[in-house]
């Protein structure tokens, strides 16, 4: 039993439920932890393992304040000290609990702080930063479109698998900075992890259809708001980038994370290659809303028209407006990405648009709106032919049997599907001119689509359904543990007599450890007597033990014990 736990236990008992929840959350306390009372909580929070988890999270100022206090200096009532009190590392009276002082003494001394000033970027550096920000926004859009089509498999560490990287590289996405780009997208809530896969969220589609300036603003705001405490400034922005590597001095993993965050800031154009700051980064650094005007002034103008060619290609004479680019890429595959991008129409790409809910009429109307050259006859023919074939194979659920049914007006298609070796895992069986299987309707539909059959989903009434292979996930909210039950359990053991409760705990611990106690006992005449007692048992309101001086067994009423101190074990 550590005597320094008692002041912390009394402090915890005096905190509000909200303050306790915040403390437990920041100290990574499990809601189902088996604490019985506030003395258990205090001792656990002062254990070396618990302190080893919280100390690396301290900022440079907090760590320096803690070291000064461990050296005997009395810290002023600064924000850093108040944070340390909130984390239960410093007592409200300004004293440092001995376990904390011991843990801090093992840490290397911190160098004095130094201030850095980040200069403003010149025109050339700002232009390069703007170009990089434009490339970052475009590449994240490519990643989101790919994730909407097929979620990404993740390794145990949360990074993309080698297979996913090869797939992205084959589709034209540069993979050198893909982990950083996905981290930026995650900070903005555009992607989320589920079932060891990375999915586009429900707000990704809206972001994809926004302008470049709006896209960048959302990414930059999300990046800033997700920054760790150590590099956030009091105004809500961030400290100079030169100070980021020292922001969490006791975290061994911080140098790597700091380097990653600095690279993400560079990719977003928030810092130039020479370390200077572009004009559009200043509002964010100061905690204000993004102002991308000076950034977009350096970007190429967007266009809203394209050239359609007889060879089934399309050419954009400049960066295509995002909303148009997203829709065009549902019906055509992009072949090259630059200020003048090219797209290619294929039977598969047109079929994909029809699966997504387009029709022959809507596609023709869209292309007539955006084309500077009209719609070439080969493209009209491709769309008409693909639309005519689309829906020849109908996939539904049989209301009576619950099995998935595959039907077609073309019996040759049904026969081809029945003998297609790529579809053997579906275990298809013939039934009255159709095929049935126990496999789910959606799985069968996408298997047929992948095998390039003109499949359509229909419901029980025959209504065509729009196919969506990977539904977006909900943008995750910042979660927090619910400590209501834990706090209620601690409060239920909180008695009015803290001295008596503490004495009971000391005696219980001494009995478990078979420790020798110096016991102060109150006598009937009002005097006190000290005994050296080897504790052997506690029960029925009495302490049993061997008197070390008289070598006899004694039984003492706990109510008569005024104090007990462990002197040997």
Image: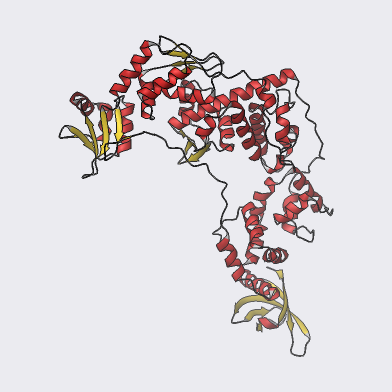
Q: How many labels does the image show?
A: 0
Which quarter shows the C terminus?
Answer: bottom right
Query: In the displayed structure, would residue 86 be above or below residue 416?
Result: below
Q: Where is residue 367 in the image (x, y as percent from the top left)?
A: 43, 19
Residue 190 appears in the picture as rendered? yes
- Identify the colour scheme used: secondary structure
Q: Residue furthest top?
A: 310
Query: Viewed as shown, does residue 449 lie left or right of 130?
Result: left
Which residue is at the front of the view, 175 or 396? 396
Residue 550 percent coordinates (x, y) = 71, 82
Work out whether 4 lies above or below 332: below
Quadrant location of residue 526?
bottom right
The quarter of the picture where residue 466 lies is top left
In-front residue for pair 451/205: 205
Q: Where is residue 39 in the image (x, y as percent from the top left)?
A: 65, 66
Q: Residue furthest bottom?
A: 525
Camera-side residue of 456 and 201: 456
| Residue 446, x across and y down, in percent | 33, 32
Q: Residue at x 67, y 53 (%)?
A: 51
Quadrant in which the N terminus appears:
bottom right
What residue appears at the point 75 percent right and 26 percent down from the top-left corner? 276
Left or right: where 385 falls relative to 171: left
Residue 176 seen from this side? no
Question: In which image quadrant can residue 309 be found?
Answer: top left
- Which one is nearer the viewer's eye here, 104 or 445? 445
């Amino acid at each position: 039993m550590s005597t320094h736990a008692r002041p912390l236990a009394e402090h915890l008992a005096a905190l509000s439920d909200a303050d306790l929840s915040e403390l437990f959350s920041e100290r990574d306390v499990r809601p189902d932890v088996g604490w019985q009372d506030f003395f258990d909580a205090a001792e656990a929070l002062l254990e070396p393992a618990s302190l080893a988890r919280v100390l690396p999270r301290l900022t440079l100022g907090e760590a320096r304040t803690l070291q000064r206090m461990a050296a005997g200096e009395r810290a002023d009532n600064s924000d850093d000290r108040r944070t340390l009190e909130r984390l239960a590392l410093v007592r409200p009276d300004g004293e440092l609990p001995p376990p904390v002082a011991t843990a801090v003494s093992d840490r290397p001394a911190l160098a004095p702080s130094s201030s850095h000033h980040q200069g403003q970027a010149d025109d050339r550096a700002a232009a390069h930063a703007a170009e990089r920000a434009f490339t970052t926004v475009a590449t994240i859009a490519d990643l989101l479109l790919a994730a909407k089509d097929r979620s990404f498999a993740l390794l145990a560490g949360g990074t993309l698998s080698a297979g996913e990287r090869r797939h992205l590289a084959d589709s034209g996405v540069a993979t050198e900075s893909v982990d950083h780009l996905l981290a930026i997208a995650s900070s903005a809530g555009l992607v989320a992890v589920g079932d060891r896969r990375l999915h586009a969220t429900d707000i990704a589609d809206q972001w994809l259809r926004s302008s470049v300036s709006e896209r960048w603003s959302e990414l930059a705001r999300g990046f800033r708001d997700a920054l760790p405490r150590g590099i956030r400034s009091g105004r809500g922005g961030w400290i100079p980038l030169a100070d980021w590597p020292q922001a969490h001095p006791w975290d061994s993993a911080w140098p790597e994370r700091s380097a990653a965050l600095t690279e993400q800031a560079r990719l977003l154009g928030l810092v130039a290659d020479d370390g200077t700051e572009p004009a559009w980064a200043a509002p964010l650094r100061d905690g204000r809303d993004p102002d991308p005007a000076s950034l977009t002034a350096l970007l190429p103008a967007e266009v809203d028209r394209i050239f359609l060619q007889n060879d089934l290609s399309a050419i954009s004479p400049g960066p295509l407006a995002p909303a148009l680019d997203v829709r065009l890429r549902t019906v055509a595959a992009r072949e090259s990405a630059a200020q003048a991008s090219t797209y290619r129409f294929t039977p598969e790409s047109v079929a994909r648009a029809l699966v997504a809910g387009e029709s022959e009429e809507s596609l023709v109307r869209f292309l007539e709106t955006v084309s500077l050259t009209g719609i070439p006859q080969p493209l009209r023919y491709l769309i008409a032919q693909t639309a005519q074939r689309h829906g020849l194979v109908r996939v539904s659920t049989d209301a009576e049997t619950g099995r998935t049914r595959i039907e077609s007006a073309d019996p040759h298609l049904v026969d081809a599907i029945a003998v297609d070796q790529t579809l053997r895992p579906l275990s298809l069986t013939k039934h009255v001119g159709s095929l049935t299987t126990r496999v789910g309707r959606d799985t069968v539909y996408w298997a047929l689509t992948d095998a390039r059959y003109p499949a359509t989903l229909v419901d029980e009434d025959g209504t065509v359904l729009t196919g969506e292979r990977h539904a977006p996930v909900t943008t995750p909210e910042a979660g927090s543990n619910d400590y209501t039950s834990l706090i209620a359990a601690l409060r239920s053991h909180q008695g009015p007599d803290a001295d008596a409760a503490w004495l009971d705990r000391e005696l219980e611990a001494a009995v478990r450890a078979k420790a020798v106690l110096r016991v102060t006992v109150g006598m009937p005449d009002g005097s006190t007597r000290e005994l050296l007692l080897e504790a052997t048992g506690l029960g029925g309101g009495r302490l049993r033990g061997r008197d070390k001086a008289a070598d006899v067994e004694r039984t003492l009423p706990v109510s008569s014990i005024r104090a007990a101190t462990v002197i040997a074990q």
